[in-house]
Image: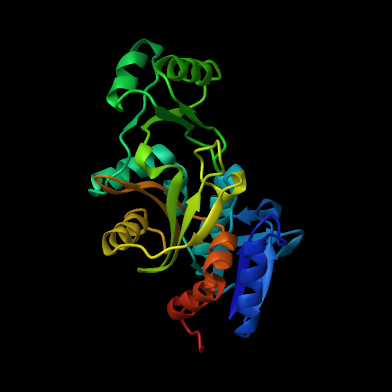
Amino acid sequence: MKIAILSRDGSLFSCRRLREAALARHHSVDIIDPLSCYMNINCDSPSIHYRGKRLCAYDAVIPRIGTAITFYGTAVLRQFEMLGSFVLNDATAIARARDKLHSLQLLAKAGIDLPVTGFADSPDETGDLIAMVGGAPLVVKLVEGTQGIGVVLAETTQAANSVIDAFRGLKAQFLVQEYIQEAKGCDIRCMVVGDRVVAAIERQAQPGDFRSNLHRGGSAHNITITPQEREVAIKAAATLGLHIAGVDILRARRGPLVMEVNASPGFEGVETATGIDIAGLMIRYIEQYTPGNSQ
């Protein structure tokens, strides 16, 4: 099977592991920078060109598209879809998950419980917006933030007003969200492959921080999740149309709350903490759903 990994940096852990896992199962692998692709869009003979040459057909494409290039990266991915490649997360699902506001609306519509979340434009209703999510402490996060960047804990109403005014002054789109105090700086990352949670870790924020992202210095360890948490993670990924997802869950008194669904989850922390071969499971999933694959 001929596989393309769409990534700007093939040296990243997830790309290296996916390449190793594919080669171990006797597939050929190319790592392609989506920003170096350009496309001929027509109904008779659509094509993708890469660094001066027309690309041949790929059986499967694994998108590892960073948030900074979502628009162009998903356009390239759609072109691969037009050419008949099986894609591990299609462009529509990735764009849906990357839009934090839209994804939360879809999850809520599907009956998936979330931290209470507010979104507004006018500065005139700040007081009611804060009250809507239960008052301070609360979390203010940029709609387009990632890896914990642009996420602020406002511990008082005055601090909340200041952060909201600052984000509005920057003309940034942001969400105001209920702070789940009982989570104590912990969340659960569930790795979903197909219709299964294949691994789960608990991430703990470093002292003095509430963001549990490993990129922000958090720590991680293997964890056994409850049947309800497993069901919620699978439903959240399916609601957004994702074959592969990192579903982040908070343990609240009222039950598991989905904080975010990541369409291109890194899995270095998960593999390290659990010893589970996430990359191999992803390649095996591709093998199941790629027409004509003999594995």
In this view, the residue in front, 261 or 248, is 248
Residue 73, above or below 231: above
Q: What residue is drawn where x is 49% and y is 65%?
A: 88
Percent coordinates x, y for residue 196 in the rendering? 37, 69
**Residue 279 in the figure: left or right of residue 120:** right
In this view, the residue in front, 66 or 208, is 208
Percent coordinates x, y for residue 86 in the rendering? 49, 70
In this view, the residue in front, 164 or 287, is 164
Residue 100, above or below 225: above
Q: What residue is drawn where x is 59% and y is 72%?
A: 58
Percent coordinates x, y for residue 76 in the rendering? 58, 55
Q: What residue is drawn where x is 40% and y is 13%?
A: 123
Does residue 44 appear anywhere in the picture? no
Does residue 25 appear anywhere in the picture? yes
Q: How many marks?
A: 0
Residue 22, above or below 93: below
Residue 53, above or below 276: above
Judged from this view, the residue extending furthest toward the bottom is 294
Colouring scheme, one of rainbow, by chain, secondary structure, one colour: rainbow
Judged from this view, the residue extending furthest toward the right is 52
**Residue 156 in the figure: left or right of residue 125:** right
Quadrant for the N terminus in the image: bottom right
Judged from this view, the residue extending furthest toward the front is 207
Q: What residue is drawn where x is 31% and y is 43%?
A: 114
Which quadrant of the view contains residue 236? Answer: bottom left
**Residue 196 in the figure: left or right of residue 265:** left
